[in-house]
Image: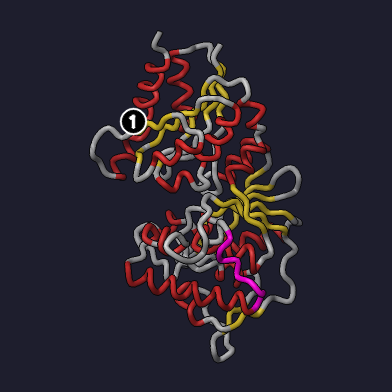
């Protein structure tokens, strides 16, 4: 009997990680009806992290109305775990899909993330795992901090509106008298620093709607804010791996909240005892919607591949598409990469064909694996 482990991330905007597992398991059963299949829908800190933890550990979903990234109210969900801690995705309150059709990284705010933290604290939560990923924001977390009572002061000593457009105007920080007693661990899906060509703005700003002029303004503002953080705390933490995650939210967790940054994929792999599970496996399937150079920097395929390499188990990455430097994953323990897209297409079309495309791809791989 063959043992398969299915540990994919979601194909963002197309298929959830659970749906990917369901499709792949059905195809495997067609070729190996008696196969032992372990489905582990994964997340690296972005979309699907809350549900992944609830699936693995148990707990309950909490829905909270909060301020969306561009104003208005959105219903954000987080998870209360059996040990009394909470797991959240900042994208639930400040995610890119919530700004669909009108992204504005100069004004998109993380205020709703702070509201989620306040709700958890009011319920007696003292430990929070906060997933950083999929954000529409580039505000260095000052919106979130403002919801918790921080004020960011201009040259005249008056509070500024806590949005990215004002980062360069901040001259001082006023901390709240009573900050909620929360121990926050941020799950990062990337290890980028705050500033520079591989930082928050230049790496992720374009996908949030920033043009060249905006990129320069955002980078300049973040650079100035990093100086203010250094003046206030003695260090900005801008060079820390993950400081640039989620438009600089990693920096806010480190400096403003005194939290820690951890690879989200490692936290979930440990929670499911992946090392024990993979020990006698014959094959592992992982993947995500698009595999490219970023996938080798804290994403799900990297984390799963590294664990498989240590166990000596083949690991195949099935993805929607493969982009620039996807081959970097081979150094992370991935055995082979296969892409599902069959024709030149659009993202809108892929949302309709994603399931069939993944079925076709998984079928092709299984045909290869079952060659006598």
Tell whether position 32 is magenta.
no
Asked whether, in this view, residue 368 is left or right of residue 62, the answer is: left
Q: Quadrant of the C terminus?
A: top left
x%, y% of residue 64?
Answer: 60, 56
Does the image show residue 18?
A: no
Query: Is residue 203 positioned above or below 9 on the image?
Result: below
Rendered residue at 56%/77% (across/down): 227
Tell whether position 235 is magenta.
yes
x%, y% of residue 337?
Answer: 40, 32
x%, y% of residue 277?
Answer: 64, 26
Q: Quadrant of the N terminus?
A: top right
Rendered residue at 43%/14% (across/down): 30
x%, y% of residue 85?
Answer: 72, 50
Quadrant housing residue 251? bottom right
Task: Name the residue at the left extreme.
Answer: 344
Rendered residue at 56%/66% (across/down): 238
Query: Is residue 2 positioned above or below 352 on the image?
Result: above
- Magenta stretch mostly in which secondary structure? loop
Q: Between residue 299 and residue 53, name the one nearer to us.
A: 299
Magenta highlight range: 232-240
Badge 1 marks a residue whose secondary structure is: helix
Query: Is residue 37 positioned above or below 13 on the image?
Result: above
Asked whether, in this view, residue 371 is left or right of residue 83, the answer is: left
Q: Which residue is mark 1?
A: 357
User: Label 1 neighbourhood size at 10 Å, few (<14), some (14-19), many (20+)?
Assistant: some
Query: Is residue 287 positioned above or below 46 on the image?
Result: above
Rendered residue at 64%/47% (across/down): 79
């Amino acid at each position: 009997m063959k043992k398969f482990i299915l540990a994919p991330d979601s194909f963002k905007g197309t298929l959830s990680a659970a749906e990917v597992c369901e499709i792949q398991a059905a195809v495997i059963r067609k070729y190996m009806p008696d196969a032992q299949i372990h489905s582990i829908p994964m997340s690296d800190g972005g979309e699907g992290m809350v549900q992944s933890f609830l699936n693995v550990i148990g707990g309950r979903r909490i829905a909270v109305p909060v301020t969306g990234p561009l104003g208005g109210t959105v219903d954000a969900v987080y998870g209360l775990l059996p040990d009394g801690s909470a797991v959240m995705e900042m994208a639930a309150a400040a995610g890119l899909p919530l700004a669909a059709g009108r992204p504005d990284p100069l004004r998109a705010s993380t205020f709703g993330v702070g509201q989620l933290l306040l709700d958890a604290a009011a319920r007696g939560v003292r430990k929070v795992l906060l997933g950083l990923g999929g954000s529409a924001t580039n505000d260095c977390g000052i919106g979130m901090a403002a919801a918790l009572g921080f004020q960011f002061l201009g040259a005249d000593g008056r509070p500024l509106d806590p949005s990215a457009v004002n980062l360069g105007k901040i001259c001082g920080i006023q901390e709240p008298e009573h900050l909620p007693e929360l121990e926050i661990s941020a799950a990062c899906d990337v290890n980028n620093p705050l500033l520079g060509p591989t930082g928050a703005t230049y790496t992720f700003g374009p996908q949030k709607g920033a043009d060249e002029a905006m990129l320069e303004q955002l980078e300049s503002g973040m650079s100035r804010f990093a100086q203010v953080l250094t003046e206030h705390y003695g260090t900005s933490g801008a060079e820390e791996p993950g400081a640039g995650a989620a438009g600089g939210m990693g920096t806010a967790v480190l400096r403003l909240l005194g939290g820690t940054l951890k690879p989200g994929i490692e936290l979930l792999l440990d929670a499911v005892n992946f090392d024990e599970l993979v020990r006698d496996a014959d094959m592992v399937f992982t993947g995500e919607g698009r595999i490219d150079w970023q996938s080798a920097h804290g994403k799900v395929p990297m984390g799963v591949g590294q664990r498989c390499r240590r166990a000596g188990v083949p690991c195949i990455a099935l993805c929607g598409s493969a982009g620039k430097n996807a081959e970097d994953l081979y150094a992370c323990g991935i055995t082979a990469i296969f892409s599902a897209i069959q024709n030149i297409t659009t993202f809108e079309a892929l949302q309709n064909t994603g399931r069939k495309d993944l079925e076709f791809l998984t079928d092709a791989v299984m045909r290869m694996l079952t060659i006598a």
